[in-house]
Image (cartoon, grey):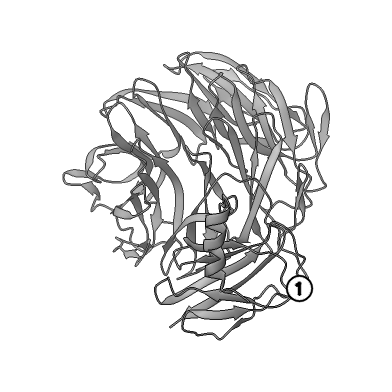
Amino acid sequence: MKRSLLSAIWVLLIGTQWQPIKAQQVEWIKQIGGAFDETVYDMCYDPAGNLYMTGALGPGGTVDGHSFSVNGTRDGFLAKFNAAMEYQWAITFGGAILPPTPNELDVGKVVMFNPVSGQIILGGLYADNGNGVVFGPGMILSGGGMFVAGYDTDGICQWVRSVPGGGAQDMVIDGGGNIYVQGFYEFSQFGYMVKYSSGGDELWYRDLGQWIVSAAWVADDDGTLAMVFSAYDGTTLIGTSIQPSTGAYSNPLFARMDTSATQLNGYKLMGTDSLGTFHALSMLGDGTFITSGGYRQNLFLPWDTLVAASGVSQPVLARLDSAGTPMWLQDFEANEVIYSAIPSTLAGDSSIYLGMDVSAPMTFGGFTVTPSTARDFVVARFDLDGNCLGVVQGGELANGRVNVHGTPDGGVIVSGPFFTSMNIGSGLTGTGSRDYFVAKYGQITSVPEQRSGADQSLHIYANPNDGTCTIDLPEGLEWTQALVLNIYDLNGRLVQSEPVGRHSGPLKLDIRAQARGSYPVELTDGAQRYSGTIVFE
């Protein structure tokens, strides 16, 4: 006698120590949308597990379905979600530029929690034509440039500071709660750094040098600052001329300086004969560093010369010792990587996540990922020795890049832009020109590679139904012990799951324990993936 799928789940729970497969399931998804281009740049956690994210909204922009008015064509935003990822609040800031321009620069670029002050520290850009940019009661800036602001955990601005004409690149907070914000003046490409106390008092301003762009920073435990960026012809750093290799446009560079930004404590240039860059920097507990970036043509290492595919900025991931010398470096063979800024992040000081968008097959260790669109996003997990432990891929990105943010539980938050739809979790539908998704994965351990050349839709009948239906096993399905049927709600949360054994006929499904509505369903083993939607009326 055939049992319903729900009955089979209870038998498994009683008779075995059953757990659903979590490795590739999306734990939650948020959408930042609207009729214009929306952006998510950065996010951070506080000690209570609340998540804060920042970026920019166009007129009518939404944060997780909550709408906001916009002054001009773009405002920055800061939003808070609690540990259960329930929306708490969002605030916007911005001024109007006349005549209107889509390039209006009101945006949050970097956000960090300051454990000394207990504040959320936000850095970004502001611009107006005389009416002022309001960050909170009595907190108004005029003109345009870089701002740094401190907010309490209820979203009230406590202080705001600015560098007129400047632009924020990165921010770091040291053990004493001091805030270092690095930026550059766009037209001169001249880099600077400002140090603020934990309460927002400016302690000093320093000119760092020429051509210090695309920099990433960390504060070391020994009282120094570490950074990576691209060294171009003409680059200077604290009075030191740093020249790339002969014939190269730029070289990846690692440097350290004291916390007064007056003394360069050493640097390491990684040679290339074309273009090379580092874009991200994280520090491990032992004082070593993780960085990522790319190179063209040849990259010269102490033990080898790496050769990139023709015309491609080859992605790299590296671990550096305290002086910036590579301990290991992984590059990833690719025929085409669309966006050369390859971000990386640490999760729990034990996993490294690397994000990129690709349009051709790529190999990560023993895993090969074949994109199913013109521009899939890919996130790979590595151990601290550079061994690839797993990969996930998602839907088609719009112009922009995928970003990754490690989480304390060893997982990763992935964000990126899309247009009409995004194939992730139960799927997202665009609401305007360009939306952003923000999604949380648990620890990534395998590859959900979709097989190509076959219909990936599940045949579900009756549909709509009364909570019971039948699902045909797809033609060409290969039975494996990892096959699982997952049912999600429209927020991407898993509500039912069961391993699927060998079947000679269709699957009987009973979801009457759930509320009426639509439920995306997925049949997968990590290599095969078939999907559909159950409509329970």
Residue nearer the viewer, 288 or 209: 288
Q: Position of residue 282 (x, y in %)?
A: 54, 30
Q: Position of residue 129 (x, y in %)?
A: 29, 53
The residue shown at (54%, 45%) is 404
Q: Which residue is mark 1?
A: 454
Quarter of the image where the N terminus is located: bottom right
The residue shown at (75%, 42%) is 332
Query: Disc 1 residue type?
Result: Ala
Q: In this orientation, does residue 183 appear?
A: yes
Please tell me in which quadrant of the rendered image residue 235 appears: top right
Relative to 139, is 429 above or below? below
Relative to 473, is 299 above or below? above
Q: In this orientation, does residue 147 appear?
A: no
Relative to 119, is 338 above or below? below
Classify residue 144 as left or right of residue 363: left
Classify residue 215 as left or right of residue 131: right
The local secondary structure at tag 1 comes to loop
Q: Position of residue 424 (x, y in %)?
A: 56, 61
Please tell me in which quadrant of the rendered image residue 341 appears: top right
Classify residue 229 as left or right of residue 146: right
Relative to 144, is 161 above or below? above
The residue shown at (52%, 26%) is 209
Disc tally is 1
Q: Would you call the spot at circle 1 few (<14 residues within 10 Å), some (14-19), or many (20 or more)?
A: few
